Image (spheres, rainbow, N blue to C red):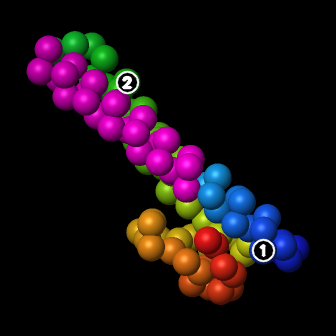
Amino acid sequence: METLDPDRVKTQFAKLVSTQILVAVLAGVLALAFVVSVFAASDLAIPIFLALIVLGLYSNLRWRCPACGQWFGRRFFFLENCPRCGVDLR
């Protein structure tokens, strides 16, 4: 795998965090719509639930180190360095 310069890794990680926050907000809106549609007996409950699953999978697959590709796991705001390669992320 190619070695990335530190500034590029930090920029890519910042974009990744921004994307994760956007996905979380979108998931919250969809979850609210899901709850409302379930209580209103709407036909939208299943598509909204499937969209939530797809968002979760997308988020989980993208949550990787920009330098080595290692999955970060459940750590989110507390990451300073990659657990595998040690590259500075912030």
Residue receiving disc 2: 47
What segment is highlighted magenta in the picture?
17-40
Q: Residues within 10 Å of mark 1 (few under 14, many from 20)?
A: some
Q: Is residue 28 visible?
A: yes
The residue located at (50%, 56%) in the rendering is: 60
- Quarter of the rendering occupied by the C terminus: bottom right
Residue 84: name its quadrant: bottom right
Residue 6: name its quadrant: bottom right
The residue located at (64%, 62%) in the rendering is: 13
The residue located at (55%, 56%) in the rendering is: 17
Q: Is residue 62 visible?
A: no
Q: Work out whether 12 lies above or below 43.
A: below
Name the kind of residue labelled 1 in the image: Pro
Residue receiving disc 1: 6
Q: Nearer the viewer, residue 20 or 34?
A: 20
Q: Residues within 10 Å of mark 2 (few under 14, many from 20)?
A: few
Q: Are marks 2 and 1 in contact (CB under 8 Å)?
A: no
Name the kind of residue labelled 2 in the image: Pro
- Quarter of the rendering occupied by the N terminus: bottom right
